[in-house]
């Protein structure tokens, strides 16, 4: 089988290894697609340390080709997607567990052995490229918009994977969604996905005031914060009193941040979102299946061009997810 591994020099190399056989409780997955997340870029370009020999990427979908002894959750031929957190099956997470791409091998490979507990079934209406986008971005969005429903306003920033999933899931819950973007070309697409209003933050850098105007002074009940330090001050100004800011990204991490006094006056909750459990993935998949939600995919690359896919994502012009077919 072919797979990518981190070399001693910090580069990703395409290598070949024998196909492994499943042990007790394990299944062998033939990977059909994987997807890239912003976190992967930090590891692929050396900004976050990854040990030599590690296989990258945290999200994938495929078919079970073999099962080991005592496997009861799946059978040969089942279509599956992995849970982002390999050992967090449900309930509160008391401490960080092993993470794909950093602590354990990821999914940029043609075959992968995994414990049966780390997988869930793919919603029937999704293909492999769509399903491969679910583990990180979709579940993060699911966790970020929890509690939003009819009568609430959710603000999403930009058009990356998490933001678009948050838009779709919030609309499925009955909430109103306001989106921000830097591109007039993306306004119509955000509206097609269900955004009632779209603010161009280049033309309107003080976009929090526009959010207040659009909500009759109330503000957004839930804000999906992806910019981090670069946008958090505007989010604090835009959030409704006793609302929630879900911090899911740090795309603009090298700027000033927020005024804590302003945040205290907002009465809001700031919560850090780090994906979700296997149970969260299963709950989300039921909603995705019921509403026939389809992930937004910007571009698909072949396995041999996986590093080009990472460069493309890093350019920041994408609208939705970047996927690799295996």
Image (cartoon, rainbow, N blue to C red):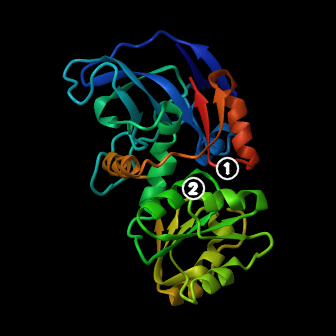
Tell me how many marks there are: 2
Q: Which mark is residue 11?
A: none
Identified at 57% across, 89% down, the residue is 216
Quadrant of the frame with the C terminus: top right
In the rendered view, tell whether residue 305 sits above or below residue 88: above
Q: Which residue is at a point 66% across and 60% down the rendered structure image?
A: 158
Categorize mark 1 by other alpha carbons within 10 Å: few (<14), some (14-19), many (20+): many
Q: Quadrant of residue 224?
A: bottom right
| Residue 106 seen from this side | no
Q: Secondary structure at mark 1?
A: loop
Q: Is residue 162 visible?
A: yes
> In the rendered image, which residue does mark 2 sit on?
164
Label disc, if present, on residue 319 of the rendered structure = 1
Distance in Å between CA atoms under marks 2 and 1: 8 Å
Residue 52 percent coordinates (x, y): 59, 28
Residue at the image point whose x is 77% and y is 62% from the top: 184
Label 2 with label 1: CB-CB less than 8 Å? yes
Ranked by sequence position, the earlier of labels 2 and 1 is: 2
Q: Nearer the viewer, residue 166 or 315?
A: 166
Q: Is residue 45 left or right of residue 62?
A: right
Query: Label 2: how many residues lie within 10 Å, few (<14), some (14-19) or many (20+)?
Result: many
Residue 16, x across and y down, in percent: 57, 12
x then y, percent, for residue 151: 43, 78
At x 62%, y 72%, the residue is: 232
The location of residue 106, given as percent across then percent down, is 50, 32
Task: Determine whether the residue tagged by mark 2 lies in a helix, strand or loop.
Answer: helix
Direction right: furthest residue: 203
């Amino acid at each position: 089988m072919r797979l990518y591994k981190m070399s001693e020099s910090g580069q990703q190399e395409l290598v070949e290894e024998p196909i492994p056989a499943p042990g007790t409780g394990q299944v062998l997955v033939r990977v059909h697609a994987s997807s890239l997340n912003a976190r992967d870029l930090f590891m692929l370009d050396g900004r976050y340390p990854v040990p030599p020999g590690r296989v990258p990427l945290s999200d994938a979908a495929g078919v079970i080709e073999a099962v080991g002894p005592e496997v009861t959750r799946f059978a040969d031929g089942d279509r599956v997607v992995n849970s982002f957190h390999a050992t967090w099956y449900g309930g509160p997470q008391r401490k960080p567990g092993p993470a794909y791409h950093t602590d354990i091998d990821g999914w940029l490979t043609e075959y992968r052995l995994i414990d049966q507990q780390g997988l869930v079934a793919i919603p029937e209406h999704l293909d492999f490229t769509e399903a491969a986008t679910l583990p990180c971005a979709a579940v993060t969005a699911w966790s970020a918009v929890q509690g939003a429903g009819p009568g609430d306003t959710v603000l999403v920033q930009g058009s990356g994977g998490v933001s678009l999933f948050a838009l779709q899931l919030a609309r499925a819950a009955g909430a109103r969604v306001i989106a921000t973007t830097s591109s007039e070309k993306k306004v119509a697409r955000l509206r097609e996905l269900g955004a009632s209003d779209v603010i161009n933050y280049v033309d309107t850098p003080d976009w929090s005031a526009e959010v207040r105007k659009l909500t009759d002074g109330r503000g957004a009940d839930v804000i999906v914060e992806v910019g981090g330090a670069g946008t958090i001050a505007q989010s604090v100004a835009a959030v409704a009193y006793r609302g929630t800011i879900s911090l899911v990204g740090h795309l603009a991490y090298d700027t000033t941040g927020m005024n804590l006094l302003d945040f205290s006056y907002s009465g809001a909750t700031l919560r850090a979102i780090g994906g979700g459990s296997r149970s969260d993935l299963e709950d989300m998949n039921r909603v995705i299946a019921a509403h026939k939600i389809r992930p937004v995919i910007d571009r698909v690359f072949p396995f041999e061009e996986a590093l080009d896919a990472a460069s493309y994502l890093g350019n920041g012009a994408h609208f939705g997810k970047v996927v690799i077919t295996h």
